[in-house]
Image: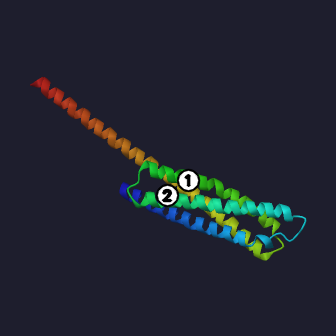
């Protein structure tokens, strides 16, 4: 039963890591599209300066959030595809937390740009997609970090219980040899 539970945790871990990689690639693609359409965004001269500044922030947020998410997913795939160590899973969990922190920032910047782009159906759909993708990246990163924590806890508990059982057996054999030496 415990083996099945562990296999489910690792398959979930692997699936979440692949999802993080795909979402990171989509975010980087959105960042590239942001860069291509920068001159067409702000047509209203009253908000042009603020919109362009926020737009540049969105380009940076999209690219960096995508990079962090891809790194977290890559570390997760690496840790799930072989015999994982506590270090590998902890490293993935740390980057998943960084990705989970950066995704809401992208979401809020995209919401601001969504409000500023009411005049254009293209940008309205584009920033709505950006909000949804960043929210999905946040959800994947949080779930992946929580799953990593549960795997780390199960590895730590099994390592501790194995060491404890070996200590008990060693103490038992030491006690047995001491008793046999006293009896002889």
Q: Residue at (81%, 65%) from the top-left corner?
A: 115
> Label 1: how many residues lie within 10 Å, few (<14), some (14-19) or many (20+)?
many
Point out residue 148 in the picture as x, y percentages from the top left corner.
49, 53
Q: Residue at (64%, 59%) from the top-left corner?
A: 64
Quadrant in which the C terminus appears: top left
CB atoms of marks 2 and 1 within 8 Å: yes
In three-dimensional space, the C-alpha distance between marks 2 and 1, rounded to whole angstroms, equals 8 Å
Q: Residue at (28%, 39%) from the top-left corner?
A: 166
Say which quarter of the image contains residue 127.
bottom right
Point out residue 13 in the picture as x, y percentages from the top left corner.
48, 59
- Residue 75: assigned label: 2
Say how the picture is coloured.
rainbow
Point out residue 102 in the picture as x, y percentages from the top left corner.
65, 55
State whether residue 83 appears in this view: yes
Q: Residue at (63%, 66%) from the top-left corner?
A: 28
Left/right of residue 141 with respect to residue 56 in the rendered view: left
Name the residue at the top extreme: 182
Which residue is tagged 1?
95
Left/right of residue 183 with respect to residue 76 in the rendered view: left
Quadrant in which the N terminus appears: bottom left
């Amino acid at each position: 039963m415990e083996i099945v539970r562990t296999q489910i945790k690792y398959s979930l871990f692997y699936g979440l890591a692949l999802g993080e990689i795909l979402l990171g690639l989509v975010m980087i693609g959105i960042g590239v599209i942001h860069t291509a359409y920068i001159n067409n965004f702000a047509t209203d001269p009253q908000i042009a300066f603020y919109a362009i500044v926020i737009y540049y922030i969105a380009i940076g947020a999209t690219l960096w959030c995508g990079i962090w998410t891809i790194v977290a997913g890559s570390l997760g795939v690496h840790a799930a595809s072989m015999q994982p160590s506590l270090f590998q899973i902890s490293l993935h969990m740390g980057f998943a937390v960084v990705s989970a922190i950066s995704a809401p920032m992208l979401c809020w910047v995209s919401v601001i740009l969504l409000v500023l782009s009411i005049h254009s159906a293209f940008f309205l759909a584009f920033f709505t997609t950006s909000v949804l993708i960043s929210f999905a990246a946040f959800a994947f990163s949080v779930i992946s970090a929580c799953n990593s924590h549960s795997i780390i806890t199960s590895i730590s508990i099994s390592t501790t219980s194995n060491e404890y059982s070996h200590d008990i057996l060693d103490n038992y054999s030491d006690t047995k040899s001491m008793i046999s030496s006293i009896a002889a």
